[in-house]
Image (cartoon, rainbow, N blue to C red):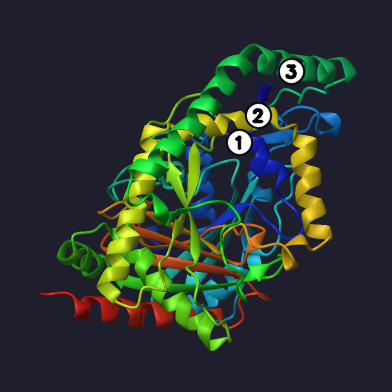
Amino acid sequence: MERMSGLDAGFYYFDSPGMHLHIGAILIFAKSGLAGRDPLEATRERIEARIGRMERFMQRVVEVPFGLAEPYWVDDAGFDLDRHLHLHGSEHPVSVKELVEMAGATISVPLDKARALWEITVVPDVQGDRFALLAKIHHVLLDGVLGIEVLAQLFDVSPEAAGGESPAAPVVESTPQAGLGDFLREVADSVMDKVREAPVDFARLAALAKDWVRFSLEDSDAKGLKPLFGAPRTPINGNLGTERSTAVLQVPLDEVESIAARAGVRMNDVVLWTVSTGLARYLQARGWEGGKDLVAMMPMAHSQRRQGAGSNQVTALFVSLYNTVPDALGRLSAIAGATAAAKRFHREAELADFVEMTKYVPPVFTWAFSRVLHEVKAFEVLPPAFNLLVTTVRGIDFPLYFSGSELLEVIPFGPLAESAGLNVTALSYNGTLEIGLVGEARLVPGLAALPGLFEAALAELSAALPR
């Protein structure tokens, strides 16, 4: 048995009827590389050969009764790959638009916590002689910033690469049947570990508070970093329901990089500017009066991944989108300043170490807190924690191959957080920036309009910059 980290336990227990903390993706492949093989069987063979590289994908979670300590991981003696692979049957080749709609329906359904926390649907016939995989993976298995590293274990850098590994050996021993003594021992060990580590951890917490005050006074861009619950109420904010809608925008990567280079900013700043401009127009069309800056939650990865620290090694800062700044270039400059400040503070204050202190929150409190907020519809009254989530990930600049088939497109879909009904995830792959949007169906009606608004905003920004 291996105990889950405090942050991973938070992601596990924050699941609620409205907040499904899994990550989705559409992976589209050239069918020609299969050499006539069935897409489902080829997928099964590749995952069977490589799953041994992917930590946790053959394990399940066992909870400590009453949530008194973090849950733990055990090898799943009943693991059956066929229970995680599904086939989508269709009488005609599926379009990308239909794939995106299917992804929305798929991520609207929570994963079964009684088994390994992932599943893949194989779509064997996609228009253009292609096939696709719809992946759904819980946040406790990978984080949304560096999760591409985990999925990359399934791929090769050339179509000729052989797989190499033998099929993963099945887990044949019985899953331990934990008794009362085991659970009591887990609770006692968890408590003792926390007592032993508390003095150092709480000294770090005091240092962090001091760093924040100093940083806020000394850094001119710190005003762009917003506190939790400092966001304005908008039509996309409120309690989450279960139904999700999805949309996608594909942009040539060199176009975004050209804009960033001409403006002297980073690709992430261009993405945030595009979201700021397009989303403000969407909200105004829905009757939002505006006048206040929107706030995005921006996940940030730990600069150095550490073994044994859990699957999730991310933090988040809340960044103003400066949508009230009328001048396009002035808005971009302000956003770039805010994101630079966020990165400086993340680095200087060692926020990634600070999040480990989530282990001091008993899981039962996390579980109860998330459900009470949901059941009483608290965010229909309370101000939103933030307005939306925006993640930008620099991916791989060369093609990957899956069982001999070239990976043509990767469309990412991130999870929603209670009170924030929109997630925008941008991932670059082999010359294209794929921007996946997920909206809570009630809070974000007409999500399909947002890609067009983003595309128009990006064109405006390009036109405003010198060539």
Which mark identifies residue 7?
1
Label 3 and label 2: CA atoms lie apart by: 10 Å
Up-down relation of residue 86 to residue 299 (above or below): below
Residue 385 location (% of width, % of height):
61, 57
- Provide the residue designation for mark 2: 359
Secondary structure type for disc 2: helix
Picture quarter containing residue 358? top right
Tag 1: residue type?
Leu
Secondary structure type for disc 1: helix
Tag 3: residue type?
Val
Residue 395 visible at all: no
Looking at the image, is mark 3 or mark 2 earlier in the sequence?
A: 3
Up-down relation of residue 246 to residue 45 (above or below): below
* 1 and 2 marks in contact (CB < 8 Å): yes
Residue 157 location (% of width, % of height):
29, 47
Please, which residue is most extreme toward the left here? Answer: 467
Residue 230 visible at all: yes
Image quarter hosting the C terminus: bottom left
- Provide the residue designation for mark 3: 191
Q: Residues within 10 Å of mark 2 (few under 14, many from 20)?
A: some
Residue 238 location (% of width, % of height):
69, 67
Q: Residues within 10 Å of mark 1 (few under 14, many from 20)?
A: many
Query: Left or right: 70 with respect to 156?
Result: right
Looking at the image, is mark 1 or mark 2 earlier in the sequence?
A: 1
Image quarter hosting the N terminus: top right
Which residue does the image show at 52% across and 84% down from the upper left? Answer: 284
